[in-house]
Amino acid sequence: MVKKPKLFIALCTLPALILTVVFMIVPMLNAIYLSFTSSTALSVGFNSKFVFLDNYIYMFKDKDFVQALFNTFKLMLVIPALTIFLSLVFAFILTQGELREKSFYRTVFFFPSVVSMTVVGIVWSFVFNPTRGILNHMLDLFNLSSWKHAWLGEGKTALWCIGAALVWQAIGYYMVMHVASIDGISQEIYEAASIDGATGVQKFFRITIPLLRRSIGTTYILALSGTINLSFTLSNVMTGGGPNGASSVLLQYMYTQGMRNANFGYAMAIAMFTLLLAIVLAMISRKLSAEKE
Amino acid sequence: MKKRFAASAMILAMSAATVLSPLTAFADAEEQELNIAIFQGGYGDAYWNQMVELFEESHEGVKVNMTISPTIGDIIRPQIVAGNVPDFICLNDGGEDGVILSLIKEHALLNLNDVFDGENYAGTGTLRDDITDGILASSKCAPYGDGDIYLAPFNSGPQGLIYNKTFFDENNLEVPKTWDEFFALGDTVKDIDGRSLFTYQGIYPGYMEEMLWPAIANECGEEALTKIANYEEGSFNNEGVLKALTHIKEIADKGYLLEGTVGMNHTESQTEMMLGKAAFITNGTWMENEMQDAPREDRFEFAMAPIPTENADDVHYVFDSCEQFSIPAAAKNQELAKEFLRFLYSDESVSAFAEASGALYATKSAREVAKDKLSTAIYNMYGIYDEANASSLIMSFSAVPADCKINPKDEIFNPITSVMNDEMTVEEWAQNVEDAFAQIRADQEAAK
């Protein structure tokens, strides 16, 4: 038996460990500490007051924060579910359908995941542009001019424009994951179902979704945290949180408070709250998908 | 073989650098270094390159290290946190990056009273006397409301309603003096070629300060703005201010706002206006430079009108922009930074700035000094002050306490989109601002 080179293995993990501690653990602990202070963007903790829970208490009296929280909830309720459902449909069509251009579609659908989020935001800003955007032009083309809006400038539409961009950029990524899991389902099951006369829709709901429940549980949590994270970039690029906070999300508000209003402590408290929220939601959905098994 | 040679060469070079660096540091001891951080805005960098060169030429043994960038705030913030503070900063307190705002909140800027009470660069009098009246006393320069100067004024220029002079001349249109004339003109221009009366920078409603402050000053007098700047109770939700807010809402309610404005950014709305889709847009003198590559309608000629007033013979207030310089209190080379600041107000610098950027320093003689350096369009726009009854107006909020979470400008201007979309009434708008002011006052009390 060969003796394991324990020391060597330990040495090899050291660089990764050091990087994780220095760039992940320490900043995180620092953020937790700062969330209890009134630190500004410049004094970062050195000459700032310790205010204990003041930042957390103020949060719930702050109407802008509450607005951002509800906007985030709205997105989290709709976007992950929609993304996962659509990506499943696409994955199902690509694996079970008789399309000849399968690999072409796979590449095209995955493409948005490769592009930087800022670029995604800018591209969609062009789509929603009130005078030169493709969306309003299409509506004109189909005689639906009364449906035209200044999409990113109206309180009722701005948040959902960001949602649309979020879904668009994430579908391909989850589709590839689901394609891999569907490939893992034995083809015989589908064939047996076909012999029994099952339609494509029936196969999708009766075979694919039940058998993929586990991987859907995982992708759903990924989509949930993706929504929290990525909505910030899109909101920042496409609307800057406007109009009047209608499309601001938690991390966007954190950025505004930390960088623009120079309230670093308060921003860190918002970040901690968002982190807790993400953890709790992930645990709940993990629990729900585990119970069904 | 080649690789190994390269590696050893690198090691040699690195060790040489380590050994020699104390020596070079010693050699530099005679030389003074000035680290300046400059925001590169619509005016470009030509002027600053020229200033660095001139300053080094006229001050022997001085080396200026300049960092210039459109995102200078994001570059210097980590440096400041790490204790590596620039000696001189050219960046506005209203910047998205919040760096100057943080420095003000933290009382981390150097008091500049002695620079302005001292002699000007030419040695002909005190610098204070050279600066345009009113600016140094305003909270743009004296943010704590006690007259002590912590920010030095850079360029200053009028802001108002930009319009196409050719279009007005060809159609024999008069620049509207009152709100009634303004709205009547809306119908006239619609009949001429279907253009809307007005547009603004949609998703950046902060530009509307150029209309809001003069409108409030017209309704309630200039001192009302001082009360607002100090967050006084009742300063925003009152009859006069509501009248001004109502005029702004009327633009949308009566259908005079260019469709889609609320969803446009500054470049888009400015382009639409220059293409003849709207007759007016709020903006400053920098627009000519900023939009030099933008498409425009035939023979477009820049001109600027003041914001309409209630009565024709009322004072027409013109909102003044004022960008700022500052020196951090932790700067290593404060005396040299002050000398650089004095130098920037010299005739040479003022005239170079006008030539390179088409804008004027906030000094009394700037327009005279730079007379033949300005383009016609810019000269015309500055001419807004010459109109009868025009008066320049400066408005800047006094600093909020360090742990105040409210940004007064956001509270006042962000609702404009909702108001224009008819999702909010002017009364709600005014009350929200009052609520924010109340919170700021509470924070001020707590800070005492």
Image (cartoon, coloured by chain):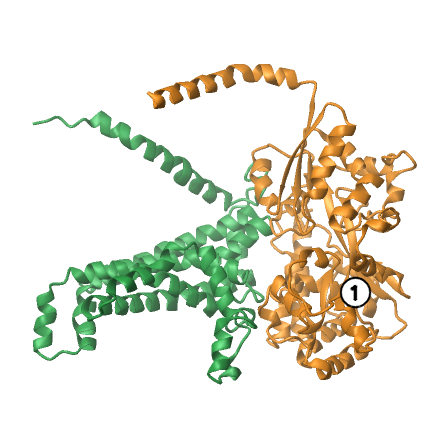
Chain colours: A green, B orange
Q: Residues within 10 Å of mark 1 (few under 14, many from 20)?
A: many
Residue B437 percent across, percent down from the top left: 68, 60
Residue A148 percent across, percent down from the top left: 52, 78
Residue B385 or residue A80, whichever sits in front: B385
Q: Quadrant of the N terminus of chain B?
A: top left
Counting labels gives 1
> Which residue: 82% across, 35% down?
B114
> Which residue: 20% across, 63% down?
A212
> Which residue: 54% across, 50% down?
A266
Is any atom of residue A285 visible in this view? no
> Which residue: 85% across, 50% down?
B372
Residue B336 or residue B42, whichever sits in front: B42
Residue A162 percent across, percent down from the top left: 46, 65
Residue B382 or residue B230, whichever sits in front: B382
Q: Is residue B422 above or below residue B396?
A: below
Q: Is residue B371 above or below residue B258?
A: above
